[in-house]
Amino acid sequence: MDKNSEVILFIFKNRRWPQEFIINKFSHYYKTEKIFISDIIEKNNREIIKFINQTIKKNNISAVIFEGDHISIFNFNFIKSIKGTKKGILLFDDFMYHDINLLTAQACDFVLTGCPHSSIKFKKMGHNSLFIPIESDGNIFKKYDNIEKKIDVLFFGDQNKYRKDYIDYIRKNGINLKTVSIEDKENPKHEDLVKLINESKIVINFSRAEFLKKKYLKSHIYKNYYQFKGRLYQTGLCGTACVTEYSPSHSLIFNENELISFKSKEECINILKKTLSDKKILEFYANNLYKKCIELEDKNYIKKIKKLIDADKVNLNITNKFPFWYKFIFIKQRIWLRFRKEKFLPFFKEIFDIIFSNQKNLFIETLLFSLYSVSYSFAFLIKYPFKKIKKVLIR
């Protein structure tokens, strides 16, 4: 089959930064189309599903991939209603949303996830799943020859309280560390960041992350978790060594000769000082990481992704009975998205479908969903005229 003869349709919730990398990655083999739900949210769910199905037929789509995580309108029933093509779900933060994603993924043929440990969890449940490195575009992140390594240690990314404690501690121990955050002038352009990585002897990575959606998760027990970050392969593709905070996912992709890990501030300082003081050690880890990350680079990795998409679907023992909490959070999202738009007809079209469409719910669930919808309707009717008056006054 000729390159770019197949068409992938991406269904994104709204415009976000990772999508550039995703589209570029798949463009190495596929033609790509995309739909942003935020652009068509004035339609109700039924109309959106119809629009997607028409797009699939019109463009001869070979697979459609839905953006997962961060609760939207893409639940099991929504994806199941999409016809005529293979379907997959793309996950960025599955650790926070795994219980939700696991139910939604039952409507899919395959799962792509930005965490290798997450991929294993889906495989254990019988899904066709693959780890997908997100920011691994070799046309952006690449090694420059004969560039001077004048920065000892670089950290790029957001500085939360936890990371700042580490950064302050590293500096107090006499190590020259440069930080670049999204607010800095150097970071907006990819080429500026790539140049900084190339100029650095070591990039430091922090794996610890905190839960965001506590009301959907069991995070009242665990305050944080250890994430697999794209910073690892961004650094490796630039030919720079990486010293990283421990995450159990790292060993699924990298070995001990490619990535150096620490579990405490003291261990971090010892590793940084030892590595910076020995050029041979520095080059050893930088070269090994580079070789590994070339395997993860888009032009090479797309072959694995295509193999997954082309694979026969695994027959899962799917149940059509879903827990109340799963149904309710998607009902809330369907209503909230239209409520926020403040459009009269789209809002009440969705309310009508929630109350009267047959979703195979229990009687008590139908009653509760209807009462919730009616209460939001009253809130909308109270709010709507005041918004209209405000717009008139502004004019």
Image (spheres, helix red, strand yellow):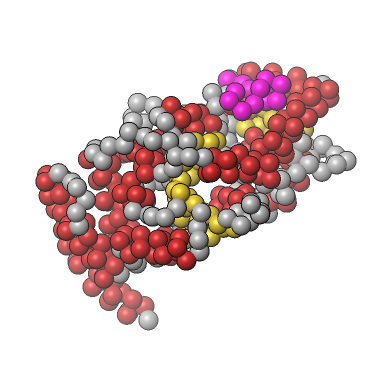
Q: Is residue 221 magenta?
A: no
Residue visible at 27% across and 37% down? 319
How many numbered marks appear? 0
Q: Is residue 367 left or right of residue 178?
A: left
Position of the C terminus, as image quadrant, is bottom left
Q: Is residue 304 left or right of residue 100?
A: right
- Residue 36, horizontal then vertical, whole percent: 46, 60
Going by the picture, which residue comes out furthest to the right? 146
Residue visible at 46% across and 46% down? 88
Does 384 sit above or below residue 95?
below
Going by the picture, which residue comes out furthest to the front? 1
Q: Nearer the viewer, residue 121 or 70?
A: 121
Residue visible at 43% across and 27% down? 124
Residue 273 at least partly seen: no
Residue visible at 62% across and 21% down? 262
Q: Is residue 263 left or right of residue 339?
A: right
Span shown in magenta: 251-263
